[in-house]
Amino acid sequence: MLSYRYFIALLLCGYFTISAAAPAVAPIPSEFIQLPLNRSNANLPLLVMRHDQAIGTVVLLPGGDAGTGKIVDGIPSSRNFLVRAREAFYAGQYNVVIAFRPSDLQNLDYSYRTSAAHIAEVAQAVDFAQHQFKVPVWLVGTSRGSVSATAATIVLGQAKLAGLVLTSSVTHGKPGAITSQAIDHISIPTMVVHHKNDRCKICSPTAASQITASLTAAPQKKFMLIEGGSDPSGDFCEALHWHGFINYEAQTVHLITEWMRKPNN
């Protein structure tokens, strides 16, 4: 058996190391619920994260078909940017509500995302957020979800929403592309965020930079071009490429939430 002094000598010489256990990190509380829709036998899946010191709530509208993916321990496995970045919004002191595809739909195509039925679904998610948390609600959409967020904001306006954030916006080539909608009717603070290297053919950074010029009724507006990130993979229009702010999710969301706090800046 090593003597105490000999053990200390070996420790000082680097023969042994003592490591402390990493502190346990408490999981962020979340709940997966099915919100009954105003039509027969249909629910709207919502992932809800309540922040005890929230200054607002974000209702996040994912892109693609807005499916949850496989649900594991109550958490969706979707790789969508907004789903991956949900904890960054929470860290910014916001409640988080992610609205996925309604249970009676097989897809969320571009045309449906501007329909009265879909806007009613988004309105129910916003009403749920207002009733649950009683703090200002911001609508945030990404990619195809930017079509939904824009269409819903034009209808709901400042009576329901504190502001709008569009990320990786659909700029052209599809029904509901942002500049094809009546965005001159949007009268709430609006932020447009795009990655400089986004190569999705219907989501042009150059065209996205011109969206704010058409937001003539918005009291505050800002365009932000993101350059950070690394290791894009897969399709140019998918979540793990620049289109999804890959490996720069938290930084991107931090920039968004900081502007949301003070949109006059």
Image: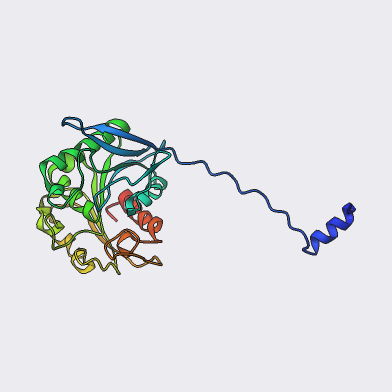
From this view, report whether residue 106 is shown above or below residue 247: above
Q: Position of residue 123 (x, y in %)?
A: 19, 38
Left or right of 191? Residue 47 is right
Report the front residue among 156 and 216: 156
Q: Quadrant of residue 240?
A: bottom left
Q: Position of residue 37 (x, y in %)?
A: 20, 33
Left or right of 214? Residue 98 is right
Q: Position of residue 163 (x, y in %)?
A: 23, 47
Q: How many marks?
A: 0
Which residue is rendered at x = 61% and y = 49% of the image?
22
Q: Position of residue 150 (x, y in %)?
A: 17, 50
Which residue is rendered at x = 19% and y = 48% of the image?
108
From this view, report whether residue 248 is shown above or below residue 114: below
Q: Quadrant of residue 57?
A: top left
Quarter of the rendering occupied by the C terminus? bottom left
Which residue is rendered at x = 24% and y = 56% of the image?
143
